[in-house]
Image (tube, helix red, strand yellow):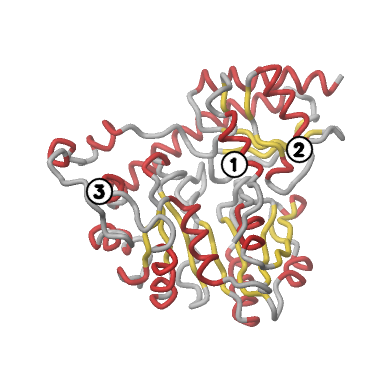
Amino acid sequence: MLLEPFRMERMQSTWENLVEFDLSESGVRPLTLRELMAMGFDLDGFLDVPLGYSQSNGTLELRETLTAQYPGATVDHIEVTNGTSEANLVVAMTLLKPGDEVALQVPNYMQYWGVPRGLGATVNTFRLAVERDWEPDWDEFERAVHAKTRLVYLSNPNNPTGSVLSRRSMERMVRRCEEVGAWLLVDEVYLGAEIDSGRTPSFWGMSDRVIVTSGLSKAYGIPGIRIGWIVGPPAVMADCWSQHDYITIGPNKLSDRLARIAVMPENREKCYGRTREILKTNLAIVREWAAGFGGFLEWREPKAGAIGLFQYRSSAPSIELCERIRTKHSVLIVPGAHVGLESHLRIWLGGREEYLKEGLRRVGEELRLLMA
């Protein structure tokens, strides 16, 4: 398995701690350990816990608590991982072999552009069409999902558009996967980060061919403890556990204990409510900023998630534009080319208000030069 460079992640890891304003993030500003203590984490009690290995597929306590989010699931339906990215990787390692075909929704978090190719699979894409309010281009979907397709990958709510698929689209996708015998992998890490709408329905339970992944990094606002999970048929989860043994083996003991606190139903809702309030406040700031460009910037406001996807009216390549913004203004944002959609910018909405305003002001300086 030889993985090609993950362009967006490499850009972020290179520069995010060196710029003055990092607007390339994708969740809300993180919770602190003190805030998790207020939710019930006993730090003093944990100080005497021996720091040995934790249960490699997640402790029974954590998996049992997670089952409440997924009706019909048992602890054997769940594998706990080091973040949602590892969850997605483990599923690919479990299900894909050389010569398989994968259908990838774009724009997207492009992990599933590189990972399947590294495993020897072919990746076929289908678009979410902005003119259809980010619903799938069904002609492209039908061409991408066929008898040779082993796996279909979606993010819902979507990264980077913030869109949420309609129930009709969800049902159509599931039906097509059942017809061709493909697995449907849905990254639901933004479920719970809705801004004004109700809770996004999960794909879980719609078919025996559905596998979902999620984690604490986005809607919960706790990326630093690196906890994610996979929910799927027990036989597939047993195989995922076998693959997990070859990489990180399992999550660390402190992270597992913290996660048990965060995913308790009452605390989960506190985290989601905090995320919603941050995003509602910041969305108004970004809306006013975007309106100040007289049509040069266009976007559809996200229904969920802490990122905005902006189309700019210029032929300037997005990577070059973002590099100018970084070097001249010390602001890091994500070029559309890194999410599968050129002439766009992905900008973080989840920071503190004054931080966001100043970062946007600096980005705006370069955009106005481009307009001129």
Between circles 3 and 2, the one closer to the viewer is 3
- Image vertical order of residue 176 relative to residue 266, above or below: below
Between circles 1 and 2, the one closer to the viewer is 1
Between circles 3 and 1, the one closer to the viewer is 1
Q: Depth check: give the residue in front, 249 or 176.
A: 249
Q: Residue at x 37, y 58 (%)?
A: 249
* Labelled pair 3, 1 in contact (Cβ < 8 Å): no
**Among the 4 quarters of the image, the one containing residue 329:** top right
- Image vertical order of residue 24 relative to residue 86, above or below: above
Q: Indicate the secondary structure of the residue bearing disc 2.
A: strand
Q: Residues within 10 Å of mark 3 (few under 14, many from 20)?
A: some
Disc 2 designates what residue?
311
Disc 3 designates what residue?
257
Of callouts 3 and 2, the N-terminal one:
3
Q: Position of residue 162 (x, y in %)?
A: 60, 46
Q: Residue at x 65, y 25 (%)?
A: 288
Of callouts 1 and 2, the N-terminal one:
1
In this rendering, position of residue 120 left or right of residue 142: left
Q: Residues within 10 Å of mark 2 (few under 14, many from 20)?
A: many
- Image vertical order of residue 13 relative to residue 2, above or below: above
Q: Position of residue 180 (x, y in %)?
A: 65, 81
Whole-number angstrom distance, CA of label 3 to CA of label 2: 42 Å
Disc 1 designates what residue?
9
Q: Indicate the secondary structure of the residue bearing disc 1.
A: helix
Q: Indicate the secondary structure of the residue bearing disc 3.
A: helix
**Among the 4 quarters of the image, the one containing residue 224:** top left
Identity, as a three-letter code, of the amino acid under mark 1: Glu
In this rendering, position of residue 285 left or right of residue 268: right
Q: Position of residue 287 (x, y in %)?
A: 64, 29
